[in-house]
Image: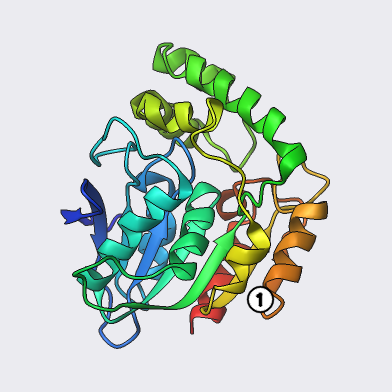
Amino acid sequence: MGCQPHHLDLPGAGVRLHAARWTGPPGPPPLLVLHGIWESWRTFSASAERLSAGRTVYCLDLRGHGGSGRPPGGYRFVDYAADIRAVLPRLGPVVDVLGHSLGAAVALHAAAGRCEPGAAPARIRRLVAAEPPVLLSGDWPVVRADMARFRELRRRPVDEIFRELAATPARTEAWRRMIARALAETDDGVFRAMVEGEQGEVDWGALLSRVGADTLAIGADPAVPGALLTGARMRTLTEGLPSAAVAVLPAAGHHVEIDSAGAFHALVEEFLA
C-alpha cells in the first residue's frame, strides 16, 4: 500500500467534479468508483489502490462532496447520475462502475439513463451496486430523520463528529476521522434534498428494468444494524433486475468494503474479470 493517486477535474452536468486516479495496466475497461452520501473519494482509496493492480481506477467526488463543485441545488439521484453520464465518455468508450450506498443508487440511475446531449456514447459494461438504498415509501420517514440528524452533526467540530461514529476493529480511528472530516465538508444542499423532499420517491421497478449492464449487488448482513439491502428492498431489486448476481456478506454492516474487506474485494475482482 502507499501508491499516491493523480488528482484531476472532470466536467459534470454543469458542475466541476474532482477525481483521484490510480493508473493500472492497459486493456481492461477503467473502473469508476462512487462513494456514499456525505463521504468522499477517500472512502474507497484503499479499495482503488488494490483494484488498480488490474485496471485504471477513478474515485470521483459526487457534486457537493469532497473537492467537487457545490451548486445551490440539484442533489437528486438523477442530478448525480447526469454528472456520471457526462463523465463516462472522458474515461473511455466502455467503463465499469462500482457504487456504494448513494453511489450505488447513482450508478443504477446512470446505467438506466442516456448519455448527456453532445457527449460521445459511453457504455457501462459491469456495475457493482454495494448496499444500494432501494428506498421504499415506508423507509422515507426514518431516512429523512437520519439525514436531519447528520445535517446538524456536520455543523459541529470534527472531533465531536468523530466521537459520534461507532468504532469496530475494522472501523479504525483513522477511518472514522476521515469519515468525520468528509461529513463536515459536505454541502448542506446534499442533506436538504433528502430532508426537505427535493429527492422524491423512486419507481424502482421502472428504473431497474432499464439497466442493461451486467450487475452484481452486494448486501450487508441483515442482522447488523444499518444494513440497507435487506427484506423488501432486496426483493424490489431482485424482482426489478432479475439478471443481477447477488451476494450477502455475513457479519458485515453497511460499509461492506471495510467490515468484510477480503470477501468484498474478492467478489468485485472476480465479477469485473
Above or below residue 40? Residue 146 is above
x and y percentages locating residue 269 in the rendered image: 51, 75
Residue sitting at x 53%, y 36%: 172
Residue sitting at x 53%, y 54%: 105
x and y percentages locating residue 183 in the rendered image: 43, 28
Residue sitting at x 34%, y 60%: 84
- Please tell me which residue lies in front, 139 or 6: 139
- Please tell me which residue lies in front, 77 or 129: 77
- Please tell me which residue lies in front, 174 or 27: 27
The quadrant the N terminus occupies is: bottom left
What type is the residue that disc 1 sits on? Ala
Is residue 235 rendered to the left or right of residue 165?
right
Q: Which residue sits furthest bottom? A: 27
x and y percentages locating residue 261 in the rendered image: 58, 57
Q: Quadrant of residue 224?
A: top right
Element at label 1? loop
Crowding at dot 1, Cα within 10 Å, few <14 / some 14-19 / many 20+, comes out as some
Q: Is residue 7 visible?
A: no
Q: Which residue is mark 1?
A: 244
- Please tell me which residue lies in front, 173 or 78: 78
